Every structure is written in structure tokens, then in C-alpha cells.
Amino acid sequence: MLANSKELALGSSAPAFSLLGTDRKKYSLESFNGAKLLVIIFTSNTCPYAQAYEQRFISMQRDYGNDGVSFCAINSNDEKALPEENYTQMQARARTSQLNYPYLRDESQRVAQAYNAACTPDVYLYDAQRKLRYHGRCDDNWKEPTQVKRRELTRAIELMLQNKPIDFEMRPATGTAIRWKK
């Protein structure tokens, strides 16, 4: 089922979390204290939109990591409804895709609820004080990376690294609806 990201107030603080990563380490918001900017992506093993964007996120982490930008992906899908979303499958996905950022399991779905996440991928960009500065889509063409004309997440990261305000309209992310527990 298709969904759009829901509004979350710009300037709001990033909700705290403590989640297990596919590398078997626990991650919290404080795990990223050294990052100037933090990109949190609610994602999925099976969503075609999330899969289409995965290599773009890997490239952005590689391109901006030395500038103090950290990426973090969170999977909140109900594994009873979608067995392919379980922790073991997440570990396999992280290895196969060679993720260069933490991939975390939100089994309780409390973190997705705290962030008001709705779809995968749902993208949030936080500043050094962990205030929300960008929430929306990655770019304007999920299906054809070579046809992208507006790289919104890249533009937001670059503006923030230059200490400039985001100067464009934020458009909601579109993707597969998070599968909530019943």
C-alpha cells in the first residue's frame, strides 16, 4: 500500500531511541553525537521504493561522511505480517547491499511512532543539536536515478553544511506504508 510521509514540525527535537543494529551493537541518538548532521531513514527490506534509494543513500554517506554527516536506517515493519523484515533478513540485506551506515531494528514500532513515520523510505535530516531541518523525499525520481532533476536531500545537506537555511519547498516522501502491528 502506498503512503506519503506525515508532517513533523521543523525545529522539533529528534526523539530518543535505543535499537539493535544488524552488526549486533546497540545504537542510540547519542551514538551519533559526533555527527554535524544526522540523516534518519525509515526503511524496509522489501519495499521497492526503499530498495531503489538504497544505493543513493550509500553514495551520500560515502560522499558526505568526511564532512560530519551520518546516516542511520531503521526498519519498523511488523515481521509477523512481513517475515522478510525480521532481524536475520535485515542482517543479510545489510551484508548484500554493503550498507555503510547502521541498520537498526525497531521491533516495538515505538520509534517509528515517535517520529510519526508513515512510509519507506521516510527521510529526516537533523542538525548538530538534533533539531529537524528537513523531512521529505530524497529526490524527484525514485525509479530512474539517471532521470533525477531535483536532489532535495543532497541540496538540504549541502545547504546545512554551509550553515544556510533550506531554500526550497519540502515535498513528502512517497513509498510503501509501514506495516503496523495489529
Image (cartoon, rainbow, N blue to C red):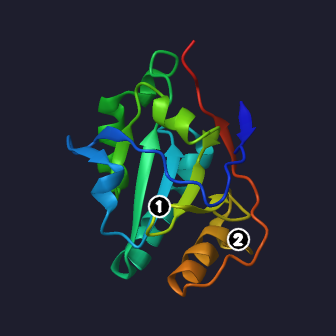
Residue occupying the far left of the picture:
24
What amino acid type should be assigned to the residue bearing mark 2?
Val
Q: Which residue is labeled 1 in the image?
A: 130
Q: Is residue 52 above or below residue 178?
A: below
Q: Residue at x 54, y 87 (%)?
A: 162
Relative depth, front residue between 64 and 176? 64
Q: Which residue is labeled 2 in the image?
A: 148
Residue occupying the far bottom of the picture:
162
What amino acid type should be assigned to the residue bearing mark 1?
Arg
- The mark found on residue 116 in the picture is none
Q: Measured from the top left, where is residue 99 in percent x and y?
A: 35, 56
Q: Is residue 123 left or right of residue 9?
A: left
Relative depth, front residue between 12 and 50? 12
Q: Is residue 2 above or below residue 162?
A: above
Marks 1, 2: nearer the viewer = 1
Q: Is residue 153 above or below residue 121?
A: below
Q: Residue at x 57, y 12 (%)?
A: 182
Q: Is residue 46 visible?
A: no
Dot 2: element = loop
Q: Measured from the top left, where is residue 11 in percent x and y?
A: 61, 61
Q: Residue at x 57, y 23 (%)?
A: 180
Residue occupying the far top of the picture:
182
Q: Is residue 80 above or below residue 9?
A: above
Q: Is residue 168 left or right of residue 146?
A: right
Tell me where residue 150 sits by quadrant.
bottom right
Q: Which is more N-terminal, label 2 or label 1?
A: 1
Q: Residue at x 41, y 33 (%)?
A: 106
Relative depth, front residue between 152 and 100? 152
Q: Is residue 182 visible?
A: yes
